[in-house]
Amino acid sequence: MAAALHIRDLAHVDLRTSAERGCSAIFSTPLPTARSIRWIPVALCLAVVGCADRTPSPNVLLVVIDTLRADHLTLYGYGRTTSPNLEALARESVLFRNAFSTAPWTTPAIAAILTGQHPAALGIAALPVELPMGAPRISSMLKRTGYSTHGVVSHLFASSKFKFDLGFDTWDETHSGDHSYVSSPGVTDQAIQALRQHRGQPIFMFVHYFDPHFNYLEHPGYEYSEVEGRGGGRGFKSILALREAAKQDALSPSDLQRIKDHYDSEIRFTDAHIGRLFDTLKELGQYDQTMIIVTADHGEAFMDRPDRWLGHTVTLYQELIHVPLIIKLPGESRAKVIDEYVSTVDILPTIVEVAGIVEEENPSLRGRSLLLNLERRAVVSETRRGASLQAVASGGWKLILDTSSGKVSLFQLSDDPGERMDRADDLPEIVERLQILRRTWAARKSGRWDQGESVEPQLSPAELERLRGLGYVQ
């Protein structure tokens, strides 16, 4: 049997005891290891811990918010209330305090969520490429077992151009606009329409929100700025221009604060529309029997470092790869917090387990269910877009390797979450321990699903211009 997971309650939530609920918490009960039994249907898990009468095939709602760094949410210690609907969800869910994205930009990060594979195994490096046809997809897995599958996305880099739509019965990307387009209302409307039209079989819905991405806009009713002035990205044609202004020291502290104010407004605005989605599930009587996962593909940097970088893609510091992760299990309403390190690549096998799907073993680099033992897991992130970096985190420590120069940095995240003090020279034994984990991971990159050449889609001039405004094309 695996060791029991370390769970602690949310300090600000008044929880009922398990005796009052008549049901033990599934996450705090020892479960068989993945080695002894592969995917465990959630009905079996619940029976083991004394729960009864649960739906064996729950609905699944997967919400991915683009460019949302965890430390701009109150749940992760932020001083502003930017996400009341996510806070309400967390009061009856599992909150993962230390979730890491596999990459600091959209295509590889969302690909990892939907396939359970690290981007390296999918052949994604410096450029966005099509997902390999042979790669596993949670949409296809669920569809084969009787689910109705629906996707609503708002970014070209996670669109049908890159084969993200395979396995979905319906796929909507009409709200994938340029940097000035406000997409959350339309994305939510499309998702609600699919929910209302759905009948019968269980449903899997993937909903992608884009608005926290540049351009940072301040939305009426969700203002945080106290003074008028420059900032928020307004007046810049692209984030490339904004970055250049930052590098030239043309942004004052008040300008930077204004940018953050607008970013927080984007988060609050997006949260309001996610709340509409949750309200629809409740109205339809589907909320309690739905597994809800909320996460982000990556974060955003706001001149946190001496390089004064704005945006994402080129570093593996926490502002870019520490992402929120909230999971509401069907039939569960207890708030729990998990502090162990987990990866967004673990989301797919967790859905598979809760849905009760029996699948063949995945190849190397696969994620592992979050319902199994989480102790001492190592999580890995990588970027080869604008830099060549690999990071591995385990046991409170994080190592970042620049694979082009060989430079290694070591941070003790438990005491230095802002990664201000490099300990690599002082602690060579910890560096070597993490290097062994990283080298083991890197040696398994050959375990790709599709050994053919990666396919880079042909984009139209309009699509290239849209990406240029978002900072992805020079």
Image (spheres, rainbow, N blue to C red):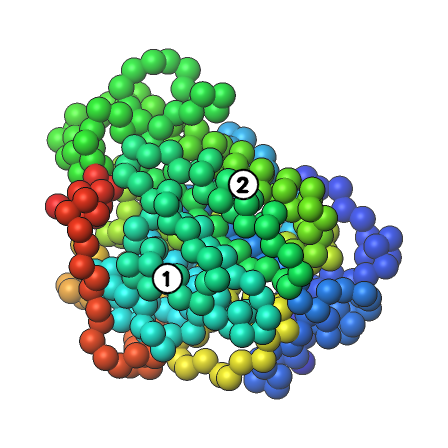
- Labels 1 & 2 near each other (Cβ < 8 A): no
Local secondary structure at mark 2: helix
Of callouts 1 and 2, the N-terminal one:
1
- Residue 169, position in %: x, y? 48, 62
Query: Pointer 1: what residue?
Result: 164
For residue 274, which numbered disc appears in the image? Answer: 2
In-front residue for pair 175/121: 175
- Please tell me in which quadrant of the rendered image residue 243 appears: top left
- Residue 276, position in %: x, y? 58, 38
Q: Is residue 287 above or below residue 433?
A: above
Residue at x-position 75% and y-position 42%: 14
Residue at x-position 39% and y-position 25%: 218
Does 172 sit left or right of 126 as displayed? right
- Residue 212, position in %: x, y? 39, 38
Residue at x-position 23% and y-position 79%: 452
Q: Residues within 10 Å of mark 1 (few under 14, many from 20)?
A: many
Local secondary structure at mark 1: loop
In-front residue for pair 132/248: 132
The amino acid marked with disc number 1 is: Phe
Residue at x-position 41% and y-position 15%: 226
The amino acid marked with disc number 2 is: Ile
For residue 346, which numbered disc appears in the image? Answer: none
Single out the residue that lies furthest toward the top: 227
